[in-house]
Amino acid sequence: MVLRQLGQLIYDHCGLNYLQNLPSLESKISKRTNELGMSIWEYTRHLEQNSQEWDVVVELLTINETYFCREENQLEVFQSIILPQLTGKNLIRIWSAACSTGEEPYTLAMMVAETGFIPLDAVEILATDINKKVLQTAKQGWYSKRSLSFRRMPEHLLEKYFVERDEGYQVVDSIRNRVRFRYLNLLDQDEMERFGEFDVIFCRNVLIYFDRTAIQKVVSSFYDRLAPEGSLFLGHAESITGMNTGFETIHTEKSFYYRKGDSSYEAVRSLGS
């Protein structure tokens, strides 16, 4: 079936799994095929031969619903438990691995600033996404007052870290300067290796679109990129418990996260390589 071939091509490229929901794939892609006057078969060939077309596909298939201070229980754990463990480091590195329009990494920078015991210049935040269009919005750091970005934003943070401008709010420079945005396909392990080592990784509400094989691959890359006993935060509906990833689940009163620390897992991987 031609539609299944397109679904497989998309899965192999970026891990988005529409193979079990082909009608949804057809619905999302039909606007583009109609625009180009192509059949699904012709569009599949077009996609194989034109790498720039992937930017269009990603925009059509990814959901970029996000907002500031999302999942506040996790943010409280990050601020009150994780960050105090990292004090004394010359540089704390944090990765927002699916940053969308930037609300998450900017929120993380604000959480650091709010601690009062970690200077902002001791923190580096890398923010990546596969959707180049949302990255442009993220880099600008400006959000309309009419957007849903501020639905959970406490008033004191809005007043402290934003400047009102042109019917919206601009993130202040001290926060914007802590975040570096880059394009990344999470299945590109070679590119991820160039990022170096991180103390904390956030990848929330992304793995729900992947199958078990793709999840295992992505989480394995996260494991490799984390410092010893580094922390991984996933979305509240996502779980890697029981997948033999090398992470241990840490439960707190407010939420849970994953910690790298299983040396036996590293030994088994090295034997198998």
Image (tube, rainbow, N blue to C red):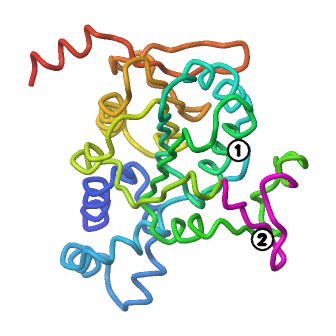
The reply, left or right, for residue 169 in relation to residue 264 is: right
Tag of residue 196: none
Q: Quadrant of residue 26?
A: bottom left
What kind of residue is marked 2?
Ser
**Residue name at image x 47 percent, y 63 percent:** 61
Name the front one of labels 2 and 1: 1
In primary-sequence order, the first of circles 2 and 1 is 1
At mark 2, the secondary structure is strand
| Residue 172 shown in magenta | yes
Mark 1, residue position: 110
What kind of residue is marked 1?
Met
Give the CA separation, mark 2 to mark 1: 19 Å
| Residue 65 position (above or below residue 217) | below
| Residue 141 shown in magenta | no
**Residue name at image x 58 percent, y 57 percent:** 177
The reply, left or right, for residue 239 in relation to residue 102 is: left
The reply, left or right, for residue 150 in relation to residue 23 is: right
**Residue name at image x 35 percent, y 35 percent:** 197
